[in-house]
Structure formats: structure tokens, C-alpha cells
Image (cartoon, helix red, strand yellow):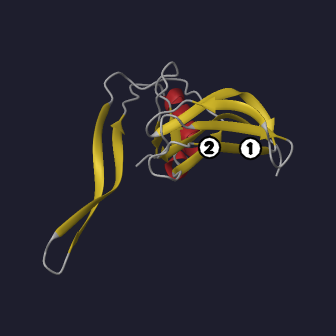
Amino acid sequence: LSAQALTIGGILNHNLSSAATVQIKAGAAAAPTTVNATVTWREFDMFATFASASHRYWRITFADATNPDGFIQVGYTLLGAYTTLSRKWNYGARRRVEFSNRRVETAWYVPNVEEFARRTILELDFGPMTNADATELRTTLFETVRKDVKGFFAIPDSADNDGWFVRFG
């Protein structure tokens, strides 16, 4: 593998406590020790942006001695380069929470419901826009990095430590 220039890293859908320490490290050796970023704790997703750094090896380290579950669980790790769109969506984004549950009944018809996943559905309005803006947006989000397939991490306001893992549907 060759060196990769990255500018963002983090973890998504984790069970870490607020006392946890997550660091992103990089270097030329297989066990990098140079800390590029210390990630700020958030309940569902934790991320940090940093100056572009090009290294062959990247590592995310976790330390959480006070984890109430007694183990560390991470849904996704995130390492990549961030992109800023040429325009933002219009004011008034609509958002709704959706739950995916599994319901099983025993032979005596006693129900048991378990939550599988929780997601937020966002409806974003980018219009009206010129054809050039629409082409740039489509090229950036769909054709260049295939965001409809791989998903991406969206940071609506760069001044706020908030973000969402997104897939277009």
C-alpha cells in the first residue's frame, strides 16, 4: 500500500463512555506512534479533522477503563479526506427518526421486541441552483466517490462538533 493523505478520522456507532480516549496515529512503520488527532467524545459518533497528512500506516487507538459494558464496540471506523461542497442546502431541512425493530413471539404468543437500529432520515433541499452547481454536486457526491453506495460522514456546520453517517436512498 502507498501513503494516503487523510484529513478526517473517527468512529461511528460506538459504546464508549465519556471518559474514553480515542487517538488517531500515523507513521511510516507498521505500528505508528505519532498522534495526528485526539477525538472528542460524542454519544453516537466521534470524529476529528486535522491538517492533511500523508502516511502509509494509520491506527485508531481506544482506551476506556470505565466502560459500563466491560468491552469496546465500534460499528464503523472512519479515515479519509473531507470535501467541502460548493454550496450548502437551503434552510429548513426536515428530519425524522426511524427505528428498526425485531419482534418475535413465543409459542404462547408472548411478544419480545428488540431494537436493531435507529436512524435519522434527512430531507435536504439544495435548489434552486444553476446547471453547473447541480452537475458539481452530482459529480462530487455520486460519481467521484460513490456516496450512494459507500456512504459518507456529513458535518452540517464545521463550527459545531456534530455529524452524521449518511447514505443516499
Residue at image position (51%, 42%) is: 66
Closer to the camera in the image, 136 or 62: 62
Q: Residues within 10 Å of mark 1 (few under 14, many from 20)?
A: many
| Helix, strand or loop under label 1 | strand
| Helix, strand or loop under label 2 | strand
Is residue 145 visible in the rendered image? The answer is no
> Can you identify the residue that label 2 sits on?
62
Closer to the camera in the image, 70 or 22: 70
Single out the mark in the foreground, 1 or 2.
Answer: 2
> Percent x, y for residue 124?
37, 33
> Can you identify the residue that label 1 sits on?
58
Is residue 120 visible in the rendered image? The answer is yes
- The residue sitting at the top extreme is 159
Residue at image position (82%, 52%) is: 1
Proximity of marks 1 and 2: CB atoms separated by less than 8 Å: no
Residue type beneath disc 2? Phe
Residue at image position (74%, 43%) is: 58
> Percent x, y for residue 18?
48, 34
- The tally of labels here is 2
- The residue sitting at the front extreme is 66
Can you tell which quarter of the image residue 40 is in? top right
Q: Is residue 29 left or right of residue 148?
A: right
